[in-house]
Amino acid sequence: MEATVRSGNGRVMMRAKPSRREISQEKRDAFLGFLIESCNVTWSARQAGLCKASVYKLRRRDAAFAAAWQDAIETGYVRLEMGLVEAALALVEGKAETEDGDAAPRVIEALSMEQAIQLLERYRATVKAGRAQSVRPGAKRMPTAEETDAAILERLEILRRQRGWNGQGR
């Protein structure tokens, strides 16, 4: 596991192992790769050695991971659509091979035609106006760290005024 740098008790910087709850970049990348292949979160998490709840929690916390997740899903569905088109063309043209005589590469390995079509219909139902729905309904974007810090400081100031605190304790 890779080491991270954290502040210690006396605020001295020290090297530490990441928490077991943290998801390494390798596992994140593996999950996203499996998600591109399958468009299935549960299976992708299992293949990457993660639990489904952990990846959903990470998606809520990490805007970059949420964006990568969305890209992986969109890439996976494009791949799925291409696989369906290739399978349909092979049936219509009566070819199951390429011009070289090799077997045509299968894009959809573990899905039947019905399953692939159902998956695409479900995906299309979740997309509004050409964009996937937000992870948090009603949210336009994830707030930045500066915005959350400012909101917290503003609320603390309101509490200070309400309780008559003057900044030197009480």
Image: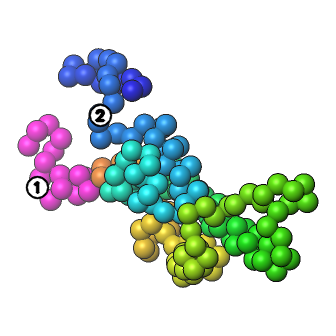
Secondary structure of the residue carrying tag 1 is helix
Of labels 2 and 1, earlier in sequence is 2
In the image, residue 164 above or below residue 124: above
Res. 92 in view: yes
Residue found at the very far front of the displayed protein:
101
Position in image of residue 44 (x %, y %) = 46, 54
Instruction: Tell me the quadrant of the picture where the N terminus can be found.
Output: top left
Who's the residue at 87% across and 56% down the image? 101
Secondary structure of the residue carrying tag 2 is loop
Residue found at the very far right of the displayed protein:
99
**Which is nearer the eye, 155 or 168?**
155
Using the rendered view, name the quadrant where residue 92 is placed: bottom right
Do the residues under discs 2 and 1 have CB atoms within 8 angstroms?
no
Q: Amino acid at mark 2?
A: Ser
Q: CA distance from mark 2 to mark 1?
A: 38 Å
Image-based side of 11 in relation to 61, left or right = left
**Which is nearer the eye, 118 or 156?**
118
Q: Amino acid at mark 1?
A: Arg
Who's the residue at 34% across and 18% down the image? 15
- Residue 121 painted magenta: no
Q: How is the image coloured?
A: rainbow
- Residue 164 painted magenta: yes
Who's the residue at 39% across and 23% down the image? 3
Which residues lie in the magenta part?
155-170
Position in image of residue 148 (x %, y %) = 37, 52
The residue singled out by tag 1 in the image is 163
The residue singled out by tag 2 in the image is 19
Who's the residue at 53% across and 56% down the image? 35
Front disc: 2 or 1: 2
In the image, residue 5 above or below residue 46: above
In the image, residue 84 above or below residue 70: below
Position in image of residue 54 (x %, y %) = 34, 52
